[in-house]
């Protein structure tokens, strides 16, 4: 070979070895580099895997949190709607209760609570006509006490309250109702007689404050000359029909049988019908009489 | 490798963002709370809001207690009520100064065991000087009860359109029926062997039998009547029953005159004492261990009833 003849060739062996060594070293280095790179890569892979896991966890958590937030806002809204509908229910109930409280006046007794007790309103009516109402302010304590009232003085309030106020307030109130309604009824009848049938009356209608004693002079027809005198007494203050009726004929001393008959029938009428209705029947009879005269 | 590094960076960035997002929910919750708070503030400033709902609740509570009080006070509870109005001023040829309003009312409720449903119309006429309110139509519907006495009274109240009388009489009627029931129960309890209530304590009939003298029986019929004017009055009758042979032996006609005697007794003693003495007279032997002047149960209306009895019987 060439390197045996040549000095260079001697050196060439060494150099060859050197080269070989460098080659080996180089390839070892390459291998090491490769190994190192591989390690880095696998580390990276592991890292990526870990990071992905962490990311997924965090994503899930974020999702959960968002859902929770959404739910809580929704629940705020939900609460709101609940609250409003409950409020509506209360408002409706309030209107209903208010109306019912108002409606109590139709039972004759209504009332309002006061700081010390109750203020009761007593309504009166005669047949379908709604008339005045009165109040009585009661202090609820033992014993029960009447603080104020608008009940007319001639109504025997003291007597009624002495009897029933302490032991049965309900009975006390309904009793008072009875007295007041009867008074209102008698007064209404007398007023109607005066206003609607003035033409049948000769002179004024006389009455006491309780309207339980009425006396008046009347005729059966506005143009009639024959006068009757009536005296009506309502002994029971809780009634609107008289307990005593006296009808006398004014003018002639001796009464003819037909007049006596008429007088007696009037007495019966006054006993059984309200005053203005008695006169309505007189008026109707008068009309019939007119009609019969015409025909 | 660079791609991997890039992915790592991307992941790290996403994670950082997610971490921030995870911190945020606390803030988001805070936001929710703040939102609620501001909502509440908004409502509080609003008169129809939550704060007033508290007021509403307390006001409603007050109204409810007033209602309860009224129903206890009157013994009448109204469950439902409604009203509609109709202005008739323009529909009819009326004077200009006159105002006519028709109200249609519906009302239902009960007075103790008696339930009622009412429909009525009120015509309100307002002119220059005064206001008049007249019930123009009244319908009363009542569930059929054991109290047959009521139906006649109801039609009379309808005819007279007397709403207040209806309630007043109903109250007194129920009061008397309750009193009758309590009295019957009292005697049944006190004289269990002699007193019989064949149709129950709420009926109008009480039978007194002698344990020793078989065949002798006193039937007390206690009715509660409502008259033309709506006045409620008790009516008691005594029907004595005796064997035929005893009637033949009754030379002084005690049994025949007993009903009248009972009336007189009622007039002087009042209902309770009259019944007591009647029971005793038939069952003296059975009950002589009881002192003669033993008082009946302490009934709240005793005073009222005895005076009322004397007046009406």
Image: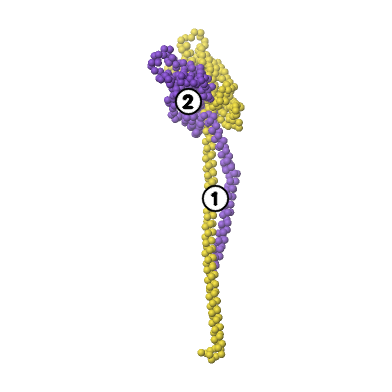
Chain colours: A yellow, B purple
- Residue B123 against residue B312 in the figure, above or below: below
* Residue positioned 49% across, 29% down in the render: B111
Question: In whole angstroms, how far apart are the C-alphas of marks 2 and 1?
Answer: 68 Å
Is residue A237 placed above or below B6 in the rendered structure? above
Q: Position of residue B240 (x, y in %)?
A: 42, 18
When asked about the image quadrant of residue A16, the answer is bottom right
In the rendered image, residue B197, in percent from the top left (x then y), is placed at 44, 25
Please tell me in which quadrant of the rendered image residue A191 appears: top right
Which residue is situated farthest in the front direction here? B289
Of the 4 image quadrants, the one containing the C terminus of chain A is top left
Q: Residue furthest bottom?
A: A5
Q: Residue at x 56, y 83 (%)?
A: A18
Question: Which of B293/A37 is in front?
Answer: B293
Dot 1 falls on which chain? Answer: A
Residue sitting at the far top? A254
Is disc 1 placed on a helix, strand or loop?
helix
Q: Nearer the viewer, residue B136 or B182?
A: B182
**Residue A14: x and y, percent?**
56, 85
Chain letter behind tag 2: B
Q: Which residue is mark 2?
A: B189
- Name the residue carrying label 1: A73
Marks 2, 1: nearer the viewer: 2
Viewer-proximal residue among B232 and A248: B232
Residue B227 seen from this side: no
Badge 2 element: helix
């Amino acid at each position: 070979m060439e390197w045996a003849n040549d000095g260079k060739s001697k050196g060439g062996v060494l150099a060859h070895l050197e080269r070989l060594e460098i080659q080996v070293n180089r390839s070892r280095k390459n291998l090491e580099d490769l190994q190192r790179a591989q390690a880095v890569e696998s580390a990276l892979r592991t890292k990526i895997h870990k990071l992905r896991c962490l990311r997924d966890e965090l994503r899930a958590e974020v999702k959960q949190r968002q859902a929770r937030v959404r739910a809580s806002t929704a629940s705020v809204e939900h609460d709101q709607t609940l609250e409003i509908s409950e409020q509506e229910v209360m408002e409706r109930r309030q209107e209903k209760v208010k109306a019912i409280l108002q409606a109590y006046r139709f039972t004759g007794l209504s009332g309002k609570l006061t700081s010390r007790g109750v203020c009761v309103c007593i309504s009166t009516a005669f047949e379908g006509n709604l008339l005045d109402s009165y109040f009585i302010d009661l202090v609820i304590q033992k014993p029960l006490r009447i603080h104020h009232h608008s009940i007319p003085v001639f109504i025997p309030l003291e007597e009624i309250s002495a009897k029933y106020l302490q032991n049965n307030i309900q009975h006390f109130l309904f009793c008072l109702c009875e007295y007041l309604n009867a008074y209102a009824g008698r007064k209404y009848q007398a007023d109607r007689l005066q206003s609607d049938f003035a033409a049948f009356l000769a002179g004024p209608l006389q009455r006491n404050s309780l309207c339980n004693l009425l006396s008046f002079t009347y005729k059966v027809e506005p143009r009639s000359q024959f006068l009757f005198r009536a005296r009506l007494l309502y002994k029971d203050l809780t009634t609107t029909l008289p307990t005593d009726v006296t009808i006398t004929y004014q003018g002639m001393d001796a009464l003819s049988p037909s007049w006596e008959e008429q007088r007696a029938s009037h007495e019966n009428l006054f006993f059984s019908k309200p005053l203005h209705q008695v006169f309505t029947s007189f008026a109707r009879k008068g009309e019939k009489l007119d009609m019969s005269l015409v025909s | 490798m660079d791609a991997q590094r890039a992915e790592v960076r991307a992941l790290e960035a996403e994670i950082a963002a997610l971490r921030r997002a995870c911190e945020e929910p606390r803030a988001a919750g805070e936001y929710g709370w703040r939102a609620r708070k501001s909502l509440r503030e908004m409502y509080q400033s609003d008169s129809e809001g939550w704060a007033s709902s508290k007021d509403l609740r307390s006001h409603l509570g007050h109204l409810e207690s007033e209602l309860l009080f009224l129903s206890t006070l009157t013994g009448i509870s109204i469950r439902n009520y409604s009203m509609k109005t109709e202005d008739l001023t323009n529909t009819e040829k009326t004077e200009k100064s006159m105002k006519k309003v028709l109200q249609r009312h519906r009302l239902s409720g009960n007075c103790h065991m008696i339930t009622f449903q009412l429909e009525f119309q009120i015509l309100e006429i307002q002119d220059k000087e005064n206001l008049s309110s007249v019930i123009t139509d009244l319908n009363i519907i009542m569930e059929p009860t054991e109290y047959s006495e009521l139906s006649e009274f109801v039609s009379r109240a309808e005819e007279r359109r007397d709403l207040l009388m209806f309630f007043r009489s109903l109250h007194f009627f129920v009061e008397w029926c309750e009193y009758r029931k309590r009295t019957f129960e009292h005697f049944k309890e006190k004289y269990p062997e002699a007193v019989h209530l064949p149709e129950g304590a709420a009926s109008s009939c009480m039978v007194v039998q002698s344990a020793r003298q078989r065949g002798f029986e006193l039937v007390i019929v206690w009715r509660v009547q409502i008259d033309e004017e709506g006045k409620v009055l008790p009516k008691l009758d005594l029907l004595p029953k005796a064997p035929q042979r005893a009637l033949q032996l009754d030379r002084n006609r005690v049994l025949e005159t007993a009903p009248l005697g009972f009336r007189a007794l009622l007039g002087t003693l009042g209902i309770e004492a009259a019944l007591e003495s009647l029971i005793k007279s038939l069952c003296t032997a059975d009950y002589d261990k009881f002192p003669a002047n033993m008082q009946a149960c302490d009934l709240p209306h005793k005073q009222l009833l005895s005076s009322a009895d004397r007046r009406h019987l």
